Image: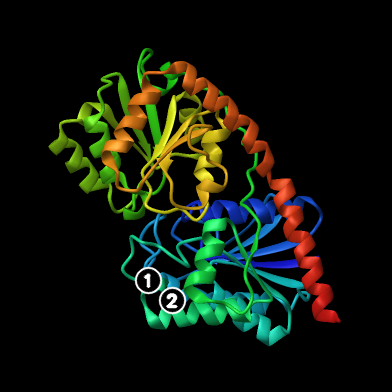
Amino acid sequence: MRILVLNYEYPPLGGGGGVAAANIAEEMARLGHHVDYITSHFMGLERQEQVNGVRVFREPVAGRKDYQTASILSMLSFPAAAVRRAVALRREADYDIIHTHFAIPSGPAGYILSKLWRKPHVLSVHGGDIYDPSKKYSPHRHPLLKLAVKRVLNQASTVVAQSKDIADRTVSIYRPKRPPLRIPLGFRTPRFAAADRAGLGLADGTVYAIAVSRLVPRKGYPELLAALAKCRSQRLVLLIAGDGPEAASLGRQCAELGIEGRVHFLGQVSEEQKYQYLSNADIFCLATHHEGFGIVYQEAMHCGLPIVTTNVGGQTDFLTDGDNALLIDPCDVEGLAAGLDRLAGDEAERRRMGARNREIIREYMIDGVARQYLLLFEEQIARRKS
């Protein structure tokens, strides 16, 4: 099968949606399929390369300023760039199917190519392209963007949501002609060199909570820092791995709260460093306002960490309060502090939840997820031919 993937983000650009899409594409290539992946270019990255069997094409876009976040201008310019590259690639050989990630901004490119080539178009929606409570320009708030998303949803041969939350919001907000299917994001077992606390500059006898994500408003870091300031446990230290536009303001907040010594900003870390820190931490925490799925939770689960996070979003498909996580209402600083204190003071509970997470993550491995997509692709190709 020849598969064309369109996604404006691909590692190291963007967040979990790019990582998840890359994992799916690479697994399809491993299973013997031809996969071309068109994405955005940014300074220092190769324009074209082969990554684990996937041909990756990075197209120049206007206004991209950093690795973590895409500007509105860069998103607006991606569809045209993607279509140009796709048309050029198709001169080599035809594609059987188009797989697009994110209704906005990638969806319009899939829409155009599907119409042009009369090929099935599978659209995966991830969260922020459907609903982001932290953004003023979230599509659910703007009539024109909302209409654009609805048209892309209705044009697609089928829509895939990664979680019940995203499936439900897609239906309730956009009322598409057909409800989306649900296929979760897949986890690929990482390979990384083992590291101990001493090698990472971490102290024995300290309880480390770690948060990994882009530093953007949706992740709720102001609430997380406020909760840390209220925690009774003085052994609890927070590690924050990631970078983004909120970094400077979060540093100032730490100073205002008097917790500079208990918060370590690690900045942007490599994949290997990320897993080394996760493997040496005690708790994973995130005060996110909403997640479409939350692949970073899978990474923490693999490393055997208990989780303290919010109860709104796709993470509730695999995180259960009291079983493998403590789930708190968004913006509930007191509840978040209580959850962190509870796990910081109970090593047995941390071990129990961590072991449970190692069990649950096995249900979300990438090979099973990729095969679900391939079966869907085969169905859509057969339907289009008939």
Residue at 24% x, 44% y is 250
Q: Quadrant of the N terminus?
A: bottom right
Helix, strand or loop for disc 2: helix
Residue furthest bottom in the image: 116
Please name whichever residue, 45 or 336, is drawn nearer the observer in this view of the structure: 336
Residue at 73% x, 47% y is 367
Look at the image and name its color scheme.
rainbow
Q: Which mark is residue 72?
A: 1
Residue furthest left in the image: 256
Q: Is residue 16 above or below residue 41?
A: above
Q: With 64 as the anchor, is 23 left or right in this view?
A: right
What amino acid is at disc 2?
A: Leu
Q: Is residue 80 visible?
A: no
Q: Is residue 284 visible?
A: yes
- Would you identify the image quadrant in which residue 54 lies? bottom right
Q: Is residue 273 above or below residue 1?
A: above
What amino acid is at disc 1?
A: Ile
Please name whichever residue, 338 or 121, is drawn nearer the observer in this view of the structure: 338
Q: CA distance from mark 2 to mark 1?
A: 6 Å
Q: Quadrant of the C terminus?
A: bottom right
Q: Is residue 299 above or below residue 383?
A: above
- Would you identify the image quadrant in which residue 76 lies? bottom left
**Residue 111's x, y, as percent?**
60, 80
**Residue 13's x, y, as percent?**
47, 55
Residue at image mark 2: 76
How many circles with numbers are drawn on the protein? 2
Q: Residues within 10 Å of mark 2 (few under 14, many from 20)?
A: some
Marks 2 and 1 close (CB-CB < 8 Å) = yes
Q: Is residue 276 above or below residue 120?
A: above
Please name whichever residue, 153 or 210, is drawn nearer the observer in this view of the structure: 153
Helix, strand or loop for disc 1: helix
Q: With 315 as the anchor, is 289 left or right in this view?
A: left
